[in-house]
Image (tube, coloured by chain):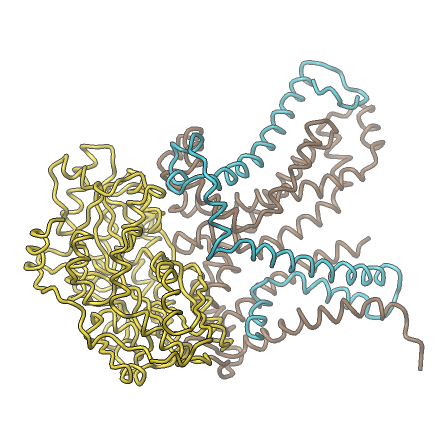
Chain colours: A yellow, B cyan, C brown
Amino acid sequence: MQRRELIQLMAASGFIPMRSQAQTTGALKPGKPYAGTTINVLSVVAPQFSAHEAKLAEFEALTGIKVKYQYVPFPSMREKLTAELVAKTDQYDVLSAMDVWGPSLYNLFDPINDRLAEKKIDMTARYPHAHLRAARDQNGTGKNILGFPIRGHVQLMFYRKDIFAKLGLKPPETWQQMIEVGQQIQSKSDLSGVAMYYGKTAGQNLMIWFNYLWGMGSDLLDAKGQPMFNNAQGVAATQAYVDVLLKHKAAPAGSASFNEADAVNSVAQGKSAMVPVWWWRYSGLVDPKTSTLKPDQVGFAPLPSMPGKEATTYTNTWFYGINKSSKRKDATMEYLTWLTNPEVEKSVLLDRKLNEVVAVQTPNLIDGDVNLRFGGMHLFGAQALKGAKGTPLFAQWPQVSDILEASISEIITGKIDVKSALDAAASRVKRAMR
Amino acid sequence: MTSTSIPIPGYQPTLENRLWTFVQQALILLLISSIILPIFWMTITAFKWPRDVYSLNSAIWFEPTLTNMVTVFQHPWNLGNKILNSIAVASGAVALAIPMATLAAYAFSRYEFRLKKTIFLTVIASHVFPGAVVVLHYFLMI
Amino acid sequence: MKRIPAYVWLLAPALLFVAAMALFPLLYSLVLSFREWKLAQSDVPGQWVGLDNYWYLLTDDPELMESLWATLIFVGFDVALTVLAALCAALLLQKPSRMSTFTRILLILPFVMSPALIGISFRFFLNPEFGILQFLLSLVIPALDGRIWLADRWLSMTAVITSDIWHWAPYMTLVILGGLASIPKETQEAAQIDGASHWQVFKDVTFPQLKPVLGIVLVLKTVFALKAFDTIFTLSNGGPGTSTQTLAYFVYHTAFHYYDLGYAAAAAYLLTALLMICSFFYLRLIFKK
C-alpha cells in the first residue's frame, strides 16, 4: 500500500496516527529484585505467542526472571482452566482466558487494579473498550480488572482480489450484496461464492450469526436476562443467515458441515472466493505451506453489514491474568508489564519473518508503519471496534452457546424451520438460566 | 486356486464351488483393503504439507516432506516427552495389573468360599462403569 | 487366631486396588448426584437437593430424551452390525490359507488405534471438499453425490456407527475365530458327509456351538457401545444438532461444557444403570459354565 493511500484511508476513518504515549507504558523495577525466579505461562496455541517466546531472552537479560511457556490447543483450553480452577495449584503464574469464559472463571484470577496504579498504566488509553471489557469482572462492567488483553480479534471479509478484479466486482458492503457477488462468481467461474461455516464446533457457527442478529436489532438476552433471539427480528436474522446456503446457494454445499478451519481451507485451496472470518486467519491464507494462494491474491475488507448500518464486528479477546494461587505474583506482574508494552506488540507486527496481524492496543492499531505493512487492515479493525458490541459476557454462556450452535446446525440440515428451532432453543436457554 | 488349502472331505471342484471360492476370496480382499486403506491414508497424511492434506488433487501425487515429523518433536508439541509418559503409564499399569489379576483369578478358579460371587461381581462391575463417572472424582481429588 | 485362608491373600491386592481406585470414586459420584454443583458459580460442591437431579433428568429434559433415542439407535445398529460383520469375517477366514493368515494379523490393527484418531480420520475422509471417501462413495452410489455426510442426521449417524464398527469388528472377528476353532471338526465333517449343504452345516452344527461365544461378544460390545465417546466427539461432535449425541456424550457435555457437575453425575448414573443391566446378562453367561 502506498503512503498516499494510507493517509487517505486514515483521513476517512477519522484516526490520527500517533506515537506510543509515555503514560501508557509501565516501567520495570530497577535493580532486578526478582532475579532467579521462574514464571510459568499457560497459553493457547498461537503464532503470536511463539513470537513472544522468541523475545524472552531479552526479558531475562533485563530482570533475571526466567519464563517458561506451556501451550494448550484451543479446544482443550477451557477444560485445562477448569482443572486449574478446581485444583488451585500454583503450577502456572500467568493464565490465558477467552472473554466468554471469563465469567465462569473469575475465581481463578487476582485483580490487578492496585498493581496497575503502581505502574501508572492507563488501561483505557491503551486498549479499545471492546477489548478491555473482556478483562473486567461482573460481566464486563465491574471495577476490577483481571488481566491484560493480549490477543484480540476482529472479523474481516477475505476475498480473492484476482477473481474480483477479473470479473470487475467490488467487495460487498451489505449481506445482500455478498449473496449477489457470490452468485455472480459462481456463474462466471468454477469457484463457490462465500465459504460459510454452519457446522457444530465450539460455537464457531455463531460468530457471523451474531452480526446478523445485532444488525437486525435483536440480541441474545433482553434486559431481564431472558432469551430474545427468537423474536421476529431474531427469526428474520437467522433466516437471512442460513439462506445464504439454503435459498440463494451462494455458498459451497459443504458449508453445512464446515467449521471455521474448513471454510478458510476452502478459500486457501481455491475452491471459494470469499470467507468472513477472524483477521488472524490472514497468515494461513498467504503461507505457501498451508495455502495455494499468493499474497497478492488475497484481499480483505470490513465485514458486510445491514443496509444503512455501520460496519461492526463481533470481537474475541484473550487476556493474560495472574493466577490467584500463584506464589510469584510480583515477578509475574513484572513480566506482564514488559510483555504488554506497546513496543513489543509493534515489533511482532512489523517482523518480516512472520505474518502476524493480531494487535489489541489502540496506539498500534492506528500506527502508520503497521498499516503500511498490512494495507490498512488495522485501521479497519479500529473502526469496527469503535462500534463493536463485544461478546455477550455472562456465566451461563457455555450452555447458551452450546444450545444455539446445535440449533443452527440443525436448521441448516433443512429439516426444521427457523422459528421452531429457535423457540426450542429459547426454552432450553430459559432452563439453563434458572 | 489357493495353493495351500487343506482338502475338505466332500469337496467337488464343480463350477458352483469354484465360484463360491472366488467370491470368498474377493470378500477377503475387500476386508483387507477396508482395513489397510484408511491406515495407509492416515500414514501418508503425516508426510504431506498442510496445503496438500486439504486437497483431493494431491491425494496421491504430492510433495513429501519430513517437516511434520520434526515439528511434532519440538516445542510446544514435545511428542518425545509424551511418548515417554505413555511408556511409563503403560508399563506401570501392566506391571501392576497382571500380577494382581493372576492372583485373583487363581483364587476364583481354585477355591470355593462365601461371598465368592459377590466379590467377583464387584471386581467385574468396576470395569464396566463409563469413564466419565470414575474420572470425575480423580479430577476432583487432585 | 484362625489361620487366614490362602484365597484371602490372593484376592487382597486386587480387591484393595479396586476399592481405592474404582469403588471410592464411584461412591463419591453417587453422593455428588444428590447435590447441586455448578462450577461456574462455586468451586466447592453445593447444597443437597435429594432426588431433584434425577427428577429433572427423567421428566423435564428434552435433551436427555433425544440422547436416549440417539443412544438406542447407535447401540442397536452398532452392536448388531459389528457382530454380524465379525461373524461373516470369521467364517470367511476360518479356512487356513496364506491369505487368511495374513488377514488375521491385520485384524488387530484397527483395534489398537486410538478412537479419537479414527474419528478425526473419518471426518477427513468425509469432508465435502477433499474427502476421499466422500469422493469414492459418490461415484459408487449416485444418490450420495452432493450430500454432506455430517450435515444430515442419518448420514452422520451412519458415519459414526461405521467408524465404531471399523474400530471393533476386526477384534471381535478374532474372538469369534477363537470360538470357531474350539468347535470339534468332526461334527462339521459328519454333517457334510451326510449330504448337508454349507448353509445347513452352519445353521445346525456350527451356530449352536458358537452361541456362548456370540453371547459374550454381544454383551461386551453392547457395554463398549454404551461407553463409546471419543469417536463421536471427534467425528461429529454430537451433531448436526444433537442427533448423534449419545448418553456418554451427554454426560461429558453436561459436566465439561455446562459445568453442571451434580446433574452430570446423575446422568452418569443413569448410564451406569443401563450398563449394570448388560453386565447382569454377561455374568449370567459366564457363570452358566
Query: x, y (%) of residue A368?
Result: 14, 59
> Residue at the spot x=8%, y=51% of the render?
A5
Q: Is residue B113 above or below residue A251?
A: below
> Residue at the spot x=23%, y=53% of the render?
A239
| Residue A245 seen in the figure | yes
> Residue at the spot x=43%, y=64% of the render?
A77
Query: x, y (%) of residue C47?
Result: 49, 84
Query: x, y (%) of residue C30?
Result: 59, 74
For the N terminus of chain C, give its image quadrant: bottom right
| Residue C158 seen in the figure | no
The answer to which image quadrant residue C123 occupies is top left
Q: A151 left or right of A95?
A: left
Query: x, y (%) of residue B1?
Result: 69, 17
Instruction: Point out the residue furthest to the right here.
Output: C2
Q: C189 left or right of A369?
A: right
The residue nearer to you, when weighing A158 against C164, is A158
Q: A31 left or right of B71?
A: left
The answer to which image quadrant residue A56 occupies is bottom left
